[in-house]
Image: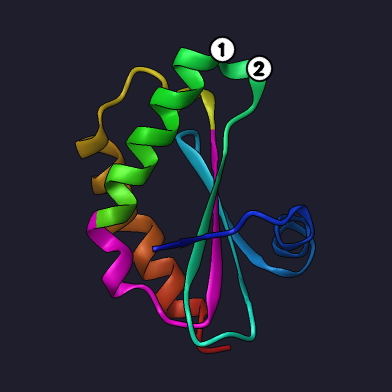
Amino acid sequence: MLTVKDNNHFLRAYKKGRYLHSNLLTLHFVKNGLDTKRYGITVSKKLGNAVVRNRCKRIIRAGLREIFDSLPIGYDYIFIAREGLLPLKSTDVLNFMNERAVPFILRNAKR
């Protein structure tokens, strides 16, 4: 699993990509012009200290690990943590990704 590290790639996903918003997280995705798929995770300092932010990233990464093979190749996927994510566990995030995020991506990726 490759990660998006350059700020310009994050900004391109925010400006030009499609997005899905919920109280748990926001997902942006955009074509990257490569033969690979990459992901990025953002957690605002508004959500808490470093321990809380790292926990949010671990929860998102755990859910993403399960669905990553079912995502289309050639896209950057950016996940932004929201306040609703704080009390949840990775299984809850995985359920959200399977029920809402993956169908949304598959429906809109071919456009």
- State the residue in front, 109 or 7: 7
Q: Which mark is residue 46?
A: 2
Classify 14 as above or below 75: above
Specify the quadrant of the image occupied by residue 28.
bottom right
Q: Is residue 109 visible?
A: yes
Q: Position of residue 10 (x, y in %)?
A: 70, 56
Q: Dot 1 corresponds to which residue?
A: 48
Q: Is residue 50 magenta?
A: no
Three-letter amino acid code at disc 1? Gly
* 10 Å crowding of disc 1: few (<14), some (14-19), many (20+): some
Which region is colored magenta? 66-81
Q: Secondary structure at mark 2?
A: helix
The image quadrant where one finds the N terminus is bottom left
Q: Residue at x 44, y 67 (%)?
A: 104
Membership of 74 in magenta stretch: yes
The C terminus, quarter of image: bottom right
As drawn, is 44 to the left or to the right of 77? right
Question: Relative to residue 32, is residue 77 depicted above or below?
Answer: above
Is 17 above or below relative to 62?
below
Q: Would you say 18 lies left or right of 22 here? A: right
